[in-house]
Image (cartoon, rainbow, N blue to C red):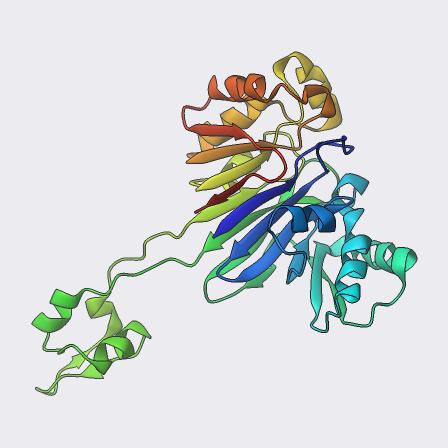
Amino acid sequence: MRVTAVGTSGGVPTAQYGTSCLYLNLFGDEILFDCGEGSQQRLMRYDASPNVDAVFVSHLHADHTLGVPGLVQALEMNERDRQLDIYVPEQRTQRATRLIQGAYGEPSYPVEVHGYGSDEPAIQTEHYGVYPFDTPYTAYSHGFSVRETDKREFLVERARALGVDPGPKYGTLQSGQSVETEGGATVEPEDVLSEPKPGRKIVYPGDTRPTPAVVDAASDASLLVYSAMFADAESERARSTGHSTAREAGEVASESGTDRLWLTHISPRHEGEEQRLESQAQTAFDGAVVAVRDGESTEL
């Protein structure tokens, strides 16, 4: 699981940094969370191909969506033929369709706009699921929790003790099917698999205030990518605009039991003050904190 910060500026791009875009490579699937203007160019710059499988939009503000039409066009010029899936809040599907058609028209390859809610995963694969959750930023804004499928260890010694010899039957048990031993006993998968171990978890709340619901969604995250628009001195502005400060990001990370915290969606006024933001977050959170900038990447 690889995560790359593609656009980290909040509100508007700067000469150096683009607006919101986060790239994830999940077991070979390539997805974006938000797609600010120029994202397709920065994806190529940071070794994160624009030929993605899906785009998840947290809300329909311009700094999170203006890159979608450009991405659609770039993929067509690269002779894409497979479908591109775009996920938006279910109340915003028509608006998202107009955004694409108004800027570009109908591409030659399939582009499907899907509406998501917060009651079920937007997608679920064998290896992971993407779970939207409500945030208080707008009437229809969401964050996303990526949860790796829980893992269960195969207990070899336990299997041998029950009379299952090494071989194809191990694979059968691991696939969830029972087997019969040479002595005629039936062994169930539950007999030889450990208790489920929680998989890795990446949480991207998008633009938000720190709320109990956001803390709950971020619980036990391996990586929390949190919108820290302002420094402490602008806390009142953060509240009035529905954003968070770096210190509040640290508080959410601490209360949720997060392992690592990335600060993103940083106001252009704080460009060059990344260490200051990190220090303010660390007053509330004793884990690893990085105010990420475009192109920074990590493996989980």
> Is 196 located above or below residue 238 in the figure?
below
Q: Residue at the spot x=67%, y=26% of the render?
A: 229
The image shows residue 98 at horizontal and vertical percentages of 88, 57
Q: Is residue 161 left or right of residue 132?
A: left
The image shows residue 174 at horizontal and vertical percentages of 29, 72
> Is 117 located above or below residue 258 in the figure?
below
The image shows residue 179 at horizontal and vertical percentages of 22, 82
> Is 168 located above or below residue 222 in the figure?
below
Q: Residue at the spot x=51%, y=25% of the render?
A: 250
Q: Residue at the spot x=55%, y=62% of the render?
A: 29
The image shows residue 171 at horizontal and vertical percentages of 27, 76
Q: Can you see residue 81?
A: yes
Q: Quadrant of residue 246?
A: top right
Q: Residue at the spot x=45%, y=35% of the render?
A: 260
Relative depth, front residue between 232 and 76: 76
> Is 135 located above or below residue 49 in the figure?
above
Q: Is residue 6 left or right of residue 128?
A: right
